[in-house]
Image: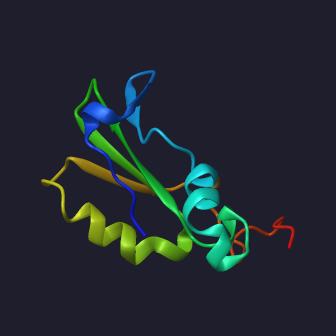
Amino acid sequence: MLHTCPLAEGENYGDFINYPESHDDVWQREYYRKFHVDFDYYPRGRIVFNRVTGIYFLYHDPCAAEVAESLRERYPEGKCVIGLDEHYQCHQCNINYIK
């Protein structure tokens, strides 16, 4: 489930442009009734754009490494950097996850 927006509709956050909604907001509106778990139960990630460098940063959960790599390949060589971010941990990766 990818949610995207044009850069012009993104939210400025310092030198970055970010998706304008939180994972929790989107989850509550679109998926909670179907899955009945919190937004951080499943692997997730986020792509942000650095307006200064012109580079996209793709942060992801360890369980989403293959998806992250396939997304990175959609960008020109050297224009998208991927990396793990402890903020994006699903229930399996986060040892402190409360069920």
Q: Quadrant of the C terminus?
A: bottom right
Which residue is painted at 64% across and 55% down in the image?
Answer: 86
Q: Quadrant of the N terminus?
A: bottom left
Which residue is painted at 53% across and 64% down in the image?
Answer: 44
In the image, 35: left or right of 44?
A: right
In the image, 63: left or right of 15?
A: right
Count how many numbered circles sit on residues in the image: 0
Image coordinates of residue 9 in percent, x first then y, are 32, 34
Q: Is 64 above or below relative to 39?
A: below
Which residue is painted at 39% across and 23% down in the image?
Answer: 15
Which residue is painted at 38% across and 67% down in the image?
Answer: 68
Observer-nearest of 6 and 71? 6
In the image, 90: left or right of 74?
A: right
Image coordinates of residue 79 in percent, x first then y, are 20, 47
Image coordinates of residue 78 in percent, x first then y, are 19, 49
Observer-nearest of 7 and 66? 7
In the image, 56: left or right of 32?
A: left
Observer-nearest of 15 and 7? 7
Image coordinates of residue 45 in percent, x first then y, are 49, 59
